[in-house]
Image (spheres, rainbow, N blue to C red):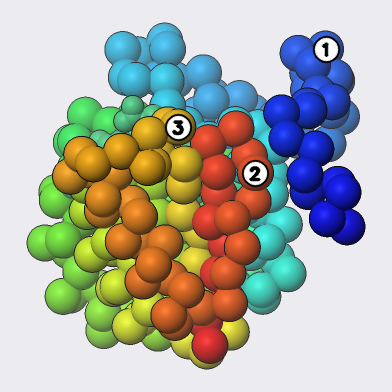
Amino acid sequence: MADLDSRQGHRYDSPEILAYLNDLHAGHDTGLASAFAAPELQGLPAIQVGMSEGKLLTLLLRLAGAKRVVEFGTLAGYSAIRMAQALPASGRLWTLELEEKYAAVARENLALAGLSDCVEVLVGPALDALPALESKGPFDAIFIDADKGQYDLYARWAAANLRPGGLLLVDNAYYFGQLMEQSPDAIAVRRCHEEAVQAFDTVCIPTPDGLLLGIRK
Ligand code: SAH
Ligand code: DHB
Ligand code: MG
């Protein structure tokens, strides 16, 4: 398939195609609609995952049979709801958010989605929460989507706290198209990729900003 891989620069999508497919395959119920709209309505940055990336999180977690999941970066709870929708009744998601205000918005959206009982929003710098969180592991899936400058540390923690066969997911794997630059954040995201290949079987899915997928060895 070298020919297909070498079709550099060809894209077959369009805004019309993507809108049709997002609606058809990845549409919103009440909770998802609220969480997706919340950033713009409530003055948060509108940097949640896309509709199809969100649905991909749901399906990948279902495929993995995930019961215990950690998320780095909650924002308004959109990806948290997408992942919690994959959990069985006994499942649990711990989601880490720096900003108290964003965490409050996320908790409202999780309540609207009927998911308050299975999702815990932990407020503060993610690194501070990790030592206590370790006792809840090992985990079945970990989604990294918080501050890019610490992606390497988060990936190392994920390698140490996922079960064999557990799923690593990392948003913004292209680092907004700046992955090959020499900034500290770009270097941290590259180190995250390089950490991941040591401990996981990996692929980088070509979403608009790249989604790293790994299965723990
Ligand atoms: N996963 C969310 C989007 C997350 S945006 C979704 O798709 O719906 C990135 C989030 O990471 C922001 O809410 C930001 O406040 C949070 N963040 C930034 N630095 C952090 C840190 N050190 N610890 C925890 N969260 C952090
Ligand atoms: C930003 C963060 C994200 O996780 C994302 O998907 C898009 C943008 C940001 O910090 O600007
Ligand atoms: Mg992101």
Give whichever of discs 1 and 3 has the lower sequence position: 1
- Crowd class of label 2 (few under 14; some 14 to 19; many from 20; radius 10 Å): few
* Quadrant where the image shows the N terminus: bottom right
Q: Which mark is residue 16?
A: 1
Tag shown at residue 206: 2
Whether residue 5 appears in this view of the structure is yes
Please tell me in which quadrant of the rendered image residue 44 appears: top left
**Vertical relation: 83 (above or below) 133:** above
Q: Is residue 162 left or right of residue 181?
A: right
User: Mark 1: which amino acid?
Assistant: Glu
Q: Amino acid at mark 3?
A: Gly
Name which residue type carries label 2: Pro
Q: On the picture, is 32 further left or further right than 195?
A: right
Q: Which residue is mark 3?
A: 177
Q: Quadrant of residue 53?
A: top right
**Lower sequence index among marks 2 and 3:** 3
* Residue 103 visible, this orientation: no
Q: Residue at x 14, y 49 (%)?
A: 124
Q: Is residue 74 above or below residue 72?
A: above
Q: CA distance from mark 1 to mark 3?
A: 24 Å
